[in-house]
Amino acid sequence: MAVIGLGLIGGSLARAARQSGLVGAVVAADRSDDELALGVELGVIDGHGSVAEVVAGADLVVVAVPVRATRDVLAAIQPHLSPEAVLTDVGSTKGSFVAAVHEIFGGWSPRIIPGHPIAGSEKNGVSAAREDLFSDHKVILTPPADAAPDALDRLTRLWQGCGATVLTMDVARHDEVLAATSHLPHLIAFSLVDTLAGEDQNMEIFRYAAGGFRDFTRIAASDPVMWHDIFLSNRDAVLRVIDHFNEDLAQLRQAIEDQDGAALLRVFSRARAARNHFSKMLSGQAYVTDMSQKPVRFRLQPGGSVNGDIRVPGDKSISHRSIMLGALADGITEVDGFLEGEDSLATLQAFRDMGVTIEGPDHGHVRIHGVGMNGLEAPRGPLYLGNSGTAMRLFTGLLAAQPFDSELTGDASLSRRPMDRVAEPLRAMGAVIDTAEGGRPPLKIRGGQKLAGIHYDMPVASAQVKSCLLLAGLYADGMTSVHEPAPTRDHTERMLEGFGYHVHRDAATSSVVGGGNLSAGHIDVPADISSAAFFLVAASIAGDSDLTLRHVGMNPTRTGVLNILKLMGADITVSNEREIGGEPVADLRVRSATLRGIDIPEDQVPLAIDEFPVLFIAAACAEGRTVLRGAEELRVKESDRIQVMADGLKAVGVATTVTPDGIIIDGGQTIVGGQVDSHGDHRIAMSFAVASLRASGEILVNDCANVATSFPGFEALARETGIRIDAEEGR
């Protein structure tokens, strides 16, 4: 490996590459002979020479000079570069590197792969080089479409060997992103320190500066020459983000001058939340995914019983809707019991991005300053909804009649889920919605459309589709009515009534008339019965179990899991029944029982659609055969839950028969140890945690990070009740 420029980055790469053993020798060229000599003395490089000498025999050439010096270095390299060598760089701007390559080389080679390590220090020179500088940091490669596969693979493996996570994106996007996330902060830090240094009382200012000031302005100690080059090389992108920042700063100045506390609170609360959830809010853009979001694996020891008195987190469906309707209401809505899971937080952040001031969440309490039915503002970019199909489908209805364009995106799992089931009826109402191939996200919704009410007969029972159309109906001319072929959860209808918006219900048809208003109020979110289901099954199948679950939501459109378990012989006692905020709640006591296999009644399928993964575990532990039919909807959830559960059960020794619309499970088979792939589906992961109670060996469940989307703190609560679970960094 030949390194041209033996500074902090070039030196650290040389040191790390040698340490990894992925290179045979590292040689370097630098304009400073002293730095080269020091590099040999410190063991950073094996040798040095002129650019021509070090490049001549190199397999990999790394340009690690200030970006404005790149052109001259490329000119020196070009005559001596082997046709088989890989050429890369480490510059903070990629457009200038690409332009210089085209100028000097007269075109592009598939063995030239620009790169940028997102790492650094305010120190410089080879003496500051560290072999761990890139550990747990990202390296962005911007390969051309025709990049040589072996060259890309070798360069990727080298950076990974240095401890980095390697990501790819196109050149233009890279420069836009870095202008916002790196270049602008550095510019502000340089400017702020320079401004304060010019104040009359500058010594007092710096003497009494707090830790936050020191942390932020640390980057103003970075290499001035390097940053001078970066700003000039990435001129257009930097100017765009400066202009945007200046506009926002001017608005804050105006708010302070006008004593507009609401405007300040809106910006500050939005920024605080964005910072706290930065990685998930933008995880569709790989360059900012927080390294703390590592893969999670559940390691489960067999056996145990389940006992205690617990309350599971708040209902996710109600948490979503509380934010949506509270944001559109007139007045302030107080929410208690809000689920602080990633899906619900994504919904909350999306409304902040549309100008709604939201305080919290703070231990489940959220305060929403409603903007009224027509008060939403155009978001600055796509609204990222994480893993939540509920949020995406409901947002589509809400945004279809807004005066502004919008785009809805999600993570990799959500991006595979079908959205035509809401897009098509909304188009019949007059909405203009574009989807990706196969009707999948992202969804692009054109603003300014006039909607007309329709009657829609749903071909498949779906609370998400029904809710989407009812929410769109709030903005439509005339009446919007939705007929469902089987009962589904009715949280939207109940909550609309709670906010003072009449919903007419006639058997299986729900209707709204557009043009009304919502009035703010108080919402107490009950514990989520879908989360309680894991513990209901756990206590049923594990011997010597006695568990009480408090304040569980008992909406009759959600109690299918209770009905099915009772048909299977579960010992569940319902007590302390009451109604809070229009939703029935109760306490549930569940004790060990001998379950029996059943033909699951098809009228119960829509009432338990989210709980079937753990019901499959109950079926595997029951005596006799369990048959599920009419559950095609399970195939288009976060995963194909029928097939993924069947594969997982097979991995732990349980044979099943998969049908197009369900599954057949013969109970009484031994659950052995094994390794299960959850496919990133939170309910699959938690279901196999429950299965461990009846296993004969250790179960490993991979890809469990998404459990936090619906059930933050699941592992701790499971351990508290007796499940032998550990969460660890996984594959």
Image (spheres, rainbow, N blue to C red):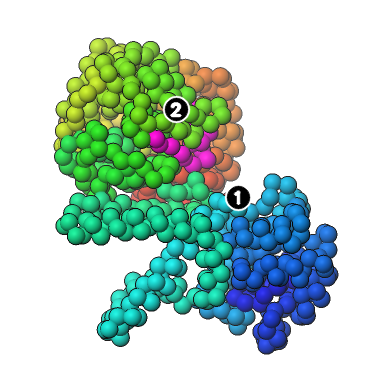
Quadrant of the rendered image containing residue 522: top left
Tag 2 secondary structure: strand
Of 8 and 15, the residue lying toward us:
8
Q: Is residue 544 visible?
A: no
Pick the front one: 249 or 508: 249
Asked whether 614 falls inside the magenta stretch, the response is: no
Residue 433's label in the rendered image is 2
Residue depicted at 59% across the width and 29% down the height: 655
Residue 173 on image: x %, y %: 55, 51
Q: Position of residue 349 (x, y in %)?
A: 34, 46
**Label 1 sits on what residue type?**
Asp
- Determine whether the residue tagged by mark 1 lies in a helix, strand or loop: loop
Q: How many marks?
A: 2
- The question of residue 415 being in magenta is answered with yes
Q: Quickly name the residue at label 1.
A: 170
* Tag 2: amino acid: Ile
> Which residues make up the magenta segment?
405-418
